[in-house]
């Protein structure tokens, strides 16, 4: 078998091998590739051997560099198809590929073509060797030094990324998304400090479901966030992602509120001010942990749960607030002959808000505030509200006052949620064409929250049974709403209602007055 065929097989290999240091050999002489591989064939550093990638000219070197991630070292010939082909590859790696991690070792058989002093000054390379001086032992030493440097740079970069995530998350630490980023950042930093393990998981008893924290179940643990092998396992039970000896260690650490260190993994109980303890699990440890490492893990486990506890406390406050609002709204709705009206309004507004591409924060605010949209009716006579016949002019004037009454109840609050409730209470009867009340606003001058609420309210009022009327058929309701497109209702909102009518109808059926 010729050298060319042998090296072509190596070059065409596309399988990414795990646990190897990638070394790119760039040289136009096949013999150099063969000798290099032979000299480094038994090379092992930190229990990882080498994966060789071959390129025979500058263009192929650039292509190989883009195709393969995490190349640790490039052994780069200077003179190939041109006298400066290798220097152009080095320039490409640093400037175009923007890679400042890979260690570049220039090798040349013609030192006079690229003087060492000039190259070192003008190019961001890490070593310069003449091929004649690179004995097998010296090549071994050069590559070992380059890998040590590469390893340290990657650890520093992982630390930087971990700290960056923590800093970004700290601005809004108590939202669920930021808490996840916060914990993931700490996991990344801790993993890199312990030698770069990629397989980590943070498990808590306060999570049921993929992401949201809804209730506390002290008998089970769920993945809150994971990395490496445990990425995309959020919401899964402990027993679904970890088994065998590791599972037993997790259960023991949780019950005993302790930290267990093994050769291949560690489990740390994370205690806080509440009883909702959590676990930090890290597997695939690259080395035996030192006493300093163990102290770092202990410090982490004693502090990370504090942030999680704060989020749970905030969630309890929000849940309490939402429950009070919804119960108050339910009392009003039931009094006026519409059971489950609040639940339907919240869910219909959620559907329309998502369809309108509201931000997560705006959608959350809308759904929390909308139950209070009709709060002003508490000051309107029941004889008028429950009157099944057509209202006279005086009665119409009085019932329209509920919009301003609701606004005046909340207008002096400095709380964003209550201010939003005031806005919705006042403007949910404003019409797209400007003929609504109380202020005759029109078009996009009406806040989108109010446009969504107004359409949801009209649909629900016609589509459900009340003490003074029967539910209207869906076809009749949609005919009326479409006829008011661009008149009473925002045209875009009507289209979104039509596009999502099946989901909205399911809400009507699931939360009917009889359910």
Image (cartoon, rainbow, N blue to C red):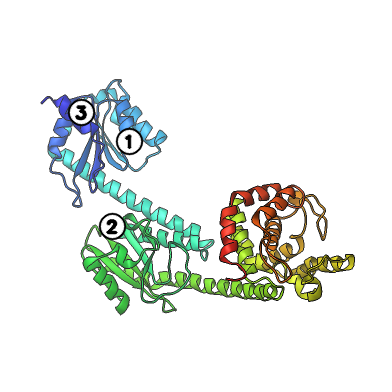
Farthest left residue in view: 1
**Element assignment for label 1:** helix
Q: Which residue is mark 1?
A: 67
**How crowded is the residue under tag 1: few (<14 C-alpha within 10 Å), some, or many (20+)?**
few
**Relative height, residue 479 to residue 78 (above, below):** below
Q: Earlier in the sequence, mark 3 or mark 1?
A: 3
**Relative height, residue 119 to residue 50 (above, below):** above
- Whether residue 11 sits left or right of residue 312 in the image: it is left
Q: Which residue is mark 2?
A: 195
Return the residue nearer the eye: 458 or 180.
458
Farthest right residue in view: 394
**Relative height, residue 253 to residue 227 (above, below):** below
**Element assignment for label 2:** loop
Total count of labels: 3
Q: Which residue is mark 3?
A: 8
The x, y position of residue 1, in whole percent, is 10, 26
Asked if the residue at tag 1 contacts the one at tag 3, i.e. Cβ–Cβ closer than 8 Å, the answer is: no
**Element assignment for label 3:** helix
């Amino acid at each position: 078998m010729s050298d060319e065929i042998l090296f072509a097989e190596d070059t065409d290999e596309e399988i990414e091998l795990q646990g190897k240091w990638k070394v790119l050999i760039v040289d136009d002489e096949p013999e150099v590739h063969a000798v290099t591989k032979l000299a480094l064939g038994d090379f092992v550093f930190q229990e990882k051997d080498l994966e060789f990638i071959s390129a025979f000219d500058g263009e192929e070197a650039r292509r190989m560099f883009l195709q393969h991630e995490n190349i640790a070292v490039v052994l780069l010939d200077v003179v190939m198809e041109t006298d400066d082909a290798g220097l152009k590859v080095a320039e490409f790696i640093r400037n175009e590929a923007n890679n400042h991690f890979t260690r570049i070792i220039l090798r040349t058989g013609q030192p006079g073509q690229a003087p060492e002093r000039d190259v070192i000054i003008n190019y961001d390379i890490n070593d310069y060797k003449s091929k004649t001086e690179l004995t097998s032992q010296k090549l071994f030493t050069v590559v070992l030094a380059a890998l040590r440097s590469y390893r340290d740079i990657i650890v520093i970069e992982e630390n930087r990324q971990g700290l960056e995530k923590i800093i970004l998350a700290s601005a809004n630490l108590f939202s669920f998304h930021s808490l996840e980023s916060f914990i993931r950042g700490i996991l990344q930093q801790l993993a890199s400090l312990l030698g770069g393990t990629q397989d980590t998981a943070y498990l808590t008893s306060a999570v049921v479901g993929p992401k949201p924290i809804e209730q506390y179940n002290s008998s089970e643990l769920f993945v809150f966030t994971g990395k490496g092998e445990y990425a995309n396992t959020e919401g899964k039970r402990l027993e679904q992602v970890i088994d065998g000896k590791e599972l037993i260690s997790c259960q023991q650490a949780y019950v005993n509120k302790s930290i267990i260190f093994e050769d291949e993994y560690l489990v740390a109980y994370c205690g806080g001010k509440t009883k909702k303890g959590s676990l930090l699990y890290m597997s695939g440890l690259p080395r035996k942990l030192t006493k300093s490492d163990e102290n770092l893990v202990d410090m982490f486990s004693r502090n990370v749960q504090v942030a999680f506890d704060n989020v749970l406390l905030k969630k309890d406050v929000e849940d309490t607030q939402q429950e009070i609002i919804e119960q108050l709204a339910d009392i009003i709705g039931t009094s006026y002959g519409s059971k489950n009206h609040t639940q339907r309004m919240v869910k219909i507004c959620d559907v329309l808000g998502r369809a309108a591409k509201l931000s997560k924060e705006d959608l959350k605010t809308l759904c929390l505030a909308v139950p209070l949209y009709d709060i002003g009716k508490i000051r309107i006579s029941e004889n008028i509200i429950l009157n099944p016949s057509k209202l006279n002019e005086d009665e119409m004037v009085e019932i329209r006052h509920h919009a301003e009454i609701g606004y005046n109840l909340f207008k002096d609050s400095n709380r964003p949620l209550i201010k939003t409730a005031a806005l919705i209470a006042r403007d949910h009867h404003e019409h797209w064409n400007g003929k609504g009340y109380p202020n005759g606003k029109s078009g996009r001058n009406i806040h989108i929250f109010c446009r969504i609420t107004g359409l949801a309210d009209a649909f629900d009022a016609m589509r459900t049974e009340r003490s003074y009327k029967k539910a209207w058929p869906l076809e009749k309701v949609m005919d009326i709403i479409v006829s008011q497109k661009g008149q009473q209702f925002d045209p875009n909102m009507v289209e979104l209602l039509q596009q999502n009518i099946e989901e909205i109808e399911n809400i009507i059926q699931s939360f009917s007055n009889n359910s």
